[in-house]
Image (cartoon, grey):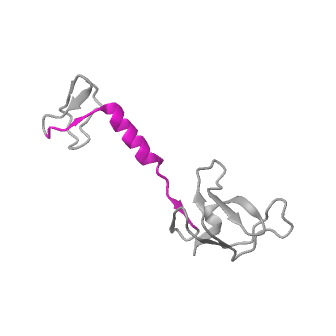
């Protein structure tokens, strides 16, 4: 038995293993450590995307750009106050976590710190 193991329900250290399940004799909770690890991993992967004001963004929201942004291949760029409809949130390593289409420019990625929820 590992000294790190505790019951996920009552946090008791008095647990034992029966075949592939772990059992807590105090609260009678049974669990499979591999399934518990998957649940914990899924919970930690849930990321909140916040706009410039700290409001949570969701897929399908409409946002407004708060600052003039330079866009590669576009002479005018993206002006402050531009409304972007039907955004899609994506995981990204470079910080561009909003995928969207903007009229006149096309498909692009934005950083959530440069938009506010409309």
Q: Residue 59, relative to residue 118: is it above or below?
A: above
- Residue lying at the far left of the rendered structure: 26
| Residue 18, percent from left and from top | 20, 24
Look at 14% across and 37% down and name the residue there.
28
Q: How many marks?
A: 0
Q: What is the magenta range?
A: 27-51
Look at 75% across and 67% down and name the residue there.
69
The image quadrant that residue 105 belongs to is: bottom right
| Residue 71, percent from left and from top | 79, 62
Q: Where's the N terminus, which quadrant?
A: top left
* Residue situated in front as seen by the camera: 60 or 74: 60
* Residue situated in front as seen by the camera: 22 or 100: 100
Answer with left or right where residue 7 lies relative to residue 109: left
**Would you say residue 33 sits in the magenta stretch?**
yes
Q: Where's the C terminus, which quadrant?
A: bottom right
Answer with left or right where residue 47 lies relative to residue 87: left
| Residue 89, percent from left and from top | 57, 57
Q: Residue 90, relative to residue 74: is it above or below?
A: above
| Residue 77, percent from left and from top | 80, 68
The image quadrant that residue 101 belongs to is: bottom right
Look at 37% across and 42% down and name the residue there.
39
Q: Residue 56, relative to residue 97: is it above or below?
A: below
Answer with left or right where residue 9 lies relative to residue 116: left
**Would you say residue 100 sits in the magenta stretch?**
no
The image quadrant that residue 99 belongs to is: bottom right
């Amino acid at each position: 038995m590992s000294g790190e193991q505790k019951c996920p329900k009552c946090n008791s250290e008095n647990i034992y293993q029966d075949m592939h399940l772990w059992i807590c004799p105090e609260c009678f909770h049974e669990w499979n450590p591999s399934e518990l690890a998957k649940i914990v991993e899924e919970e930690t992967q849930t990321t909140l995307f916040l706009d410039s004001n700290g409001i949570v963004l969701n897929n399908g929201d409409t946002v407004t750009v708060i600052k003039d942004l330079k866009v590669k291949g576009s002479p005018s760029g993206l002006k402050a106050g531009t409304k972007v409809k039907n955004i899609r949130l994506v995981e990204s390593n470079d910080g561009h976590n909003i995928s969207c289409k903007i009229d006149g420019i096309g498909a692009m990625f934005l950083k959530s710190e440069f938009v506010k929820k409309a």
